[in-house]
Amino acid sequence: MAFDAAAKPKTCIIGAGCSGFTMAKRLKDAGLPYDCFEKSDNIGGNWYYNNPNGVSSCYQSLHIDTSKWRLAFEDFPVPADWPDFPHHAQLLQYFHDYVDHFGLRETITFNTSVEDVADLPGGRYRVTLSTGETRDYDAVCVANGHHWDARTPTYPGNFTGYQVHSHHYRDPFTPYDFRGKRIMIVGAGNSAMDISSELSQRPIAEKLFISMRRGVWVMPKYMDGKPADKAVLPPWMPPSLGRSLAKKKIKKTIGNM
């Protein structure tokens, strides 16, 4: 059921992950009408493990790499007993609690995807749903994220071993058993570092390599005994000086790239 208000511009929200349902909250607070459509059977998007919509990148061991103080919604504190870096199941429950606390769930249409958005005269939009229905809106908020569309590179030559994009990785044993294998991780992003750490443990990979196009600092979650992202430079400090100080601190803590 949509949240409606007569004679006001109406918005279509695509997706009920954290961006979609917080957008719904803001519109509801402002008394503005909207429809929110979610492809899956529930909220959470990328943080919904084994999401039946098939596009979540969440793996079994995933913990968010942003501390709980940084990720908390300003109008809904995280649980006091949370660890500094919560597990994906805790984060998903937090999302459910937020949606239910603010009465957003009943305004979300589940198991319905947006298939097309077309321009209309006067700056409006026509939205086509997976049900075949079309609806017209004054604004469209695209909140379906960017992790759902895996980009898999191609390489010359022929490789007959197992290949998987991090988007489809779930754990070290299923659907593929990585134990005793020689493994190459391509890239040095957050997922690459998480999965490398997991698979490089002694009982799993025979040997693990990481291929990257340039050196990077692999940042620890803690520095000086505190979550690293709690360190904040004063607002009066020039950005160039702040970057210089941060670089020196990182090099002192973890060394060169």
Image (cartoon, rainbow, N blue to C red):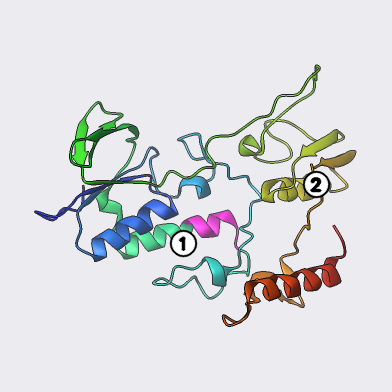
Against 235, residue 140 (above or below) is above
Q: Which residues are magenta?
A: 86-92
Spot occupied by residue 64 in the image (x, y as percentages of width and height): 61, 58
Find numbered disc 2 in the image and state the secondary structure of the residue it sits on.
loop
Against 255, residue 107 (above or below) is above
**Closer-to-camera residue (125/207):** 125
Q: Is residue 8 left or right of residue 189?
A: left
Residue at point 43%, 43% (across, down): 144
Against 192, residue 126 (above or below) is above
What is the crowding at mark 2: few (fewer than 14 residues within 10 Å), some, or many (at least 20)? few
Question: According to the image, label 2 marks what residue?
Answer: 214
Spot occupied by residue 125 in the image (x, y as percentages of width and height): 24, 38
* Occupied quadrant, residue 178: top right
What is the crowding at mark 1: few (fewer than 14 residues within 10 Å), some, or many (at least 20)? some
Instruction: Verify whether residue 99 appears in magenta.
Output: no
Q: Disc 1 residue type?
A: Tyr
Q: Is residue 98 left or right of residue 203?
A: left
Can residue 227 be seen here? The reply is no
